[in-house]
Image (cartoon, rainbow, N blue to C red):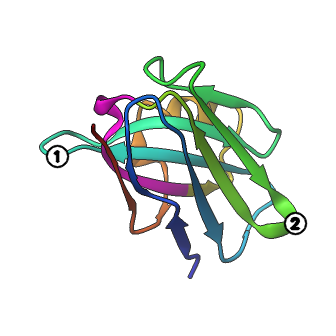
Amino acid sequence: QVQLVESGGGSEQPGGSLRLSCVISEYTNSEYCLGWFRQGTGKEREGVAVIDSDGTTNYADSVKGRFTISEDNAKNALYLQMNSLKREDSATYYCAVVFGGAGDYCSRALFAYQRMYYWGKGTLVSVSS
């Protein structure tokens, strides 16, 4: 069973930065889509950023220019660098992976979280003054 564990959440002031990390226990396919998703209180889960096994990245419009998704294959790790945080970024952030899906499948997963298969338990990000 593939497991994902997120870390790095916490409280930050508007304009601040946080870096989220996710460790993936194993890769079952060299082709994959990794992503960060978030869910605010009373809101539907939404895609934040995805990266596929070719290194192609896609971002939600709300975070473009502020957030950066990256991975370290040697560490089986996924990261989300979040800068210029806004109050509306407050949410529980989840990392997720689906194997066998890259390219167009991955870019569409940004808008359809149901395409992802394995999920972490989430890490809470709170942005307030």
Question: How far across and how far down the image is residue 15, in percent?
Answer: 45, 28
The answer to whether 16 appears left or right of 29 in the picture is left
Q: Which residue position is annotated with label 1?
A: 41
Q: Is mark 2 on a helix, strand or loop?
A: helix
Q: Is mark 1 on a helix, strand or loop?
A: loop
Q: Which residue lies furthest to the front in this view?
A: 129
Which quarter of the image is occupied by the C terminus?
top left
| Structural crowding at the residue carrying mark 2, measured as other residues with C-alpha within 10 Å and reported as few (<14), some (14–19) or many (≥20) | few
What residue sits 24% from the left and 43% below the top? 40
Question: How far across and how far down the image is residue 19, in percent?
Answer: 58, 50
Q: Which residue lies furthest to the right in this view?
A: 74
Q: Quadrant of residue 24?
A: bottom right
Residue 74, label in figure: 2
The one of 65 and 57 positioned closer to us in this rendering: 65
First of labels 1, 2 by sequence position:
1
Q: In this view, does 111 lie above or below 43?
A: above
| Structural crowding at the residue carrying mark 1, measured as other residues with C-alpha within 10 Å and reported as few (<14), some (14–19) or many (≥20) | few
Could you tell me the amino acid type at mark 2? Ala
Could you tell me the amino acid type at mark 1? Thr
Total numbered badges shown on the rendered structure? 2
The answer to whether 2 appears left or right of 10 in the picture is right
Q: Quadrant of residue 9?
A: bottom left
- Whether label 1 touches label 2, CB < 8 Å: no
Question: How far across and how far down the image is residue 89, in percent?
Answer: 35, 35
Task: Using the numbered discs, state the Cα–Cα distance from disc 1 to disc 2 in whole angstroms.
Answer: 35 Å
Q: In this view, does 94 lie above or below 112?
A: below
Which quarter of the image is occupied by the N terminus?
bottom right
Is 107 magenta? The answer is no
Question: How far across and how far down the image is residue 33, in percent?
Answer: 65, 47
What residue sits 39% from the left and 62% below the top? 122
Which contiguous range is marked in magenta? 86-96
